[in-house]
Image (spheres, coloured by chain):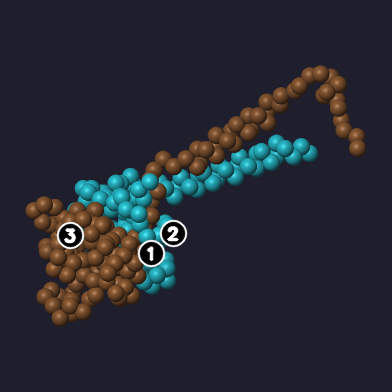
Amino acid sequence: MNMTPMIDVVFQLLIFFLTVSQVSRVNTEVLELPRLPGAEDQQTTSLTVNLNAAGELIVLGEKQSMSAVLEIARERIGSVGGEASLMTTTLRVDRRSSSRPVNELVTALRGLGITRVRIGVESPQ
Amino acid sequence: MRLSSHKQRSGETELPMTSMIDVVFLLLIFFMVTTSWHQAERELDPGIQVRESAGDAAARDLEPALVEVRRAPSGPVFRLAGRDFEDAQALTDVLRQFPNKTEGAVVLVSDAVEFDAAATAIQACKSADFRAVTYMPAGDL
């Protein structure tokens, strides 16, 4: 058996799947995030809520109303055993957006018992 | 030790194109994967808190570092201990002088400012080594 082409093919497949998994992870809403150094590297999250410059909420690539976002958040809380404090929520907010929808969202999440959020920022190079 | 010298005897050099193409594709994919098309994202980690009642001055006085992010005619300002800062670096420098970092900082955000200013205030607290930063919606400050 010729091992050289076999190893080549295995590497090709490995890199292909690495690429695909990375693309699926960064395939989030295109927003102009605040350009700040941040505090820590990105971690896995239970729920990511995007908020664009117009103040629209976008979850999983679709515009959602506040009540729909809260319904999704309730489902995610259920998936972590009903313990809202275990939820890791990431807010990706366009830096040009008003703080009003952010404040409304934060207040609503607080009402569900979600007390910890992460705010996505764009590291300046 | 015997070494094969078949190719040297024949005088012809063979270039295996299949392996060459494999390597070229591997390099191409490697550079495609490692090239960063977007700015790297990081995260700020504040807790969230909702002010239950307004005007609780006594309780607010106990909070060690309270940064208000509010709109002024010149743009967003950061108010800390009665002083207004327009520059994030100046705010960070003052926050660094707070002796008690363990009790955290509170960022009170007006509805009227852009979110960029709120994130800047949170970053200033994080940069000043406050362990916990609480984001508190403040309505119309």
The answer to the question of whether label 1 and label 3 lie on touching residues, with beta carbons closer than 8 A, is no
Residue, disc 3: B85
Disc 1 residue type? Thr
The answer to the question of whether label 1 and label 2 lie on touching residues, with beta carbons closer than 8 A, is yes
Disc 1 from disc 3: Cα separation? 32 Å
**Residue drawn where x is 36% and y is 50% of the image:** A123
Query: Which chain appears cyan?
Result: A
Categorize mark 2 by other alpha carbons within 10 Å: few (<14), some (14-19), many (20+).
Answer: few
- The residue furthest right is B1
**Residue drawn where x is 19% and y is 53% of the image:** B114
Q: Is residue B113 left or right of residue A24?
A: left
Residue, disc 1: A88
**Residue drawn where x is 65% and y is 42% of the image:** A10
Q: Looking at the rendering, in which quadrant would you find the N terminus of chain B?
A: top right
Q: Is residue A59 visible?
A: no
User: Looking at the picture, does residue B125 appear above or below residue A49?
Assistant: below
Q: Which of these two is toward me, B110 or A17?
A: B110
- The residue furthest left is B73
Image depth: mark 2 or mark 3 in front: 3
| Circle 1 SS class | loop
Residue, disc 2: A44
x and y, in percent, of residue B67 in the image: 21, 66
Q: Is residue B81 left or right of residue B14?
A: left
- Apparent colour of chain B: brown
